[in-house]
Image (spheres, rainbow, N blue to C red):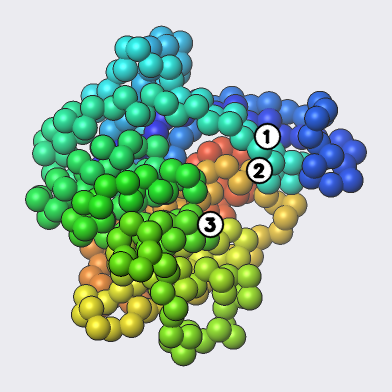
Amino acid sequence: MIIGGIVFDTTATISSKAPSLSPTSFLNTSSPGTVRKSIGGVGRNLVETVWRLGVPVVFVSALGNDPETQELLRKNMRRMDLDMTDIERIQTGVNAIYNAVHDPTGQLLVAVADMNVFDQMDPHKVESKIRKHRPSIVAFDGNMSPNVMRTIALLCRELDIPAFFEPTSVPKSLKLFMYSEVILAGSVRYASPNEYELEAMSIEAAKQLSSDRNVPEMDRDLVNWDELPSYIHRFVPHAFHLVNYIPNLFVKLGEQGSLLVRKPAETISAPKYQYFKPEPLETKNILSVTGAGDSFVGTVLANLHTHRPSMSDDAVLNRIVCNAQRAAILTLKSDKAVSPNIEPSLLNIQ
């Protein structure tokens, strides 16, 4: 089950012919380019990725009272052979909208996200859907309200269902710590932050859940620093700290690759980590960065559902990350939020 956002995306990409001295030179003026509208959102993108991998999925989300965009979504969901039974209608809400501006290489310059409709989702309705479907894993994104997050965490503990948190952005990642029960429930077993979300979550966890309110110093002898890019050195202590609260971290590092950090069940053991170099990809082949991280996470989710790895399955978990990086590459080479070339072969761990 994926509990997350449906968003109507407007993506503006500045033309490569537009003169530029620096990224800031695009500000305070208009630039030639292209504008594309599509249906996206982290939750919806995760659903499409899982669906393309051939894994059954239930989607729980919310829509505002906008008939035109609702019809666009129905067509999109029908294409994936998914119904909208578990999508709540918020009669007083406006559909979520994400407006992004990309530079000529496809990198994000600035974006504005109106996600207020998700704050109106009813936690009791979310609870009833989890009880009804009893999924193998529940993934939720940072668009959910703190109350919904608390409901998910406590119910997943009751039903012994692992929960997976996709932070979505730095501000939204902090919602996870608004109620201490969310982390202390112990059901949030997985998270997929990028490096900045990781840092923010680690600091917030220390503030809310530790006695001295500071991220503790790590034993630097636990890591072979030479095998890690220098860029990510500052984030590793935060991963080693946060993994005490969320025992499996799939850290997305963009063009730097990814990092898997896990805390063995034995609490006295040091965290395990594995760094994954980025898959080779020439810049000229990148059409858009939109959705690449979602394709990564969706592939992780589908593989977790399919293989049900234990905490000691190093080889399986490492292969899952490799599959996820391959999915992200496919989406980077596509102009879609999720590449149509993602297919069930990415569930192969042999």
Disc 3, SS: helix
Asked if residue 256 shows in the view, the reply is: yes
Q: x, y (%) of residue 187?
A: 21, 56
Type of amino acid at the residue the image marks with label 1: Val
Depicted 71 relative to depicted 288: above or below: above
Name the residue carrying label 1: 101
Q: x, y (%) of residue 241?
A: 39, 70
Q: x, y (%) of residue 230?
A: 63, 75
Closer to the chain start, of discs 1 and 3, is 1
Name the residue carrying label 3: 196
Q: Quadrant of residue 3?
A: top left
Residue closest to the far bottom: 221
Q: CA distance from mark 3 to mark 2?
A: 15 Å
Contact, mark 1 vs mark 2 (Cβ under 8 Å): yes
Q: Of residues 170 and 88, which is closer to you in this image?
A: 170
Name the residue carrying label 2: 108
269 to the left or right of 278 = left
Disc 1, SS: strand
Contact, mark 1 vs mark 3 (Cβ under 8 Å): no
Type of amino acid at the residue the image marks with label 2: Leu
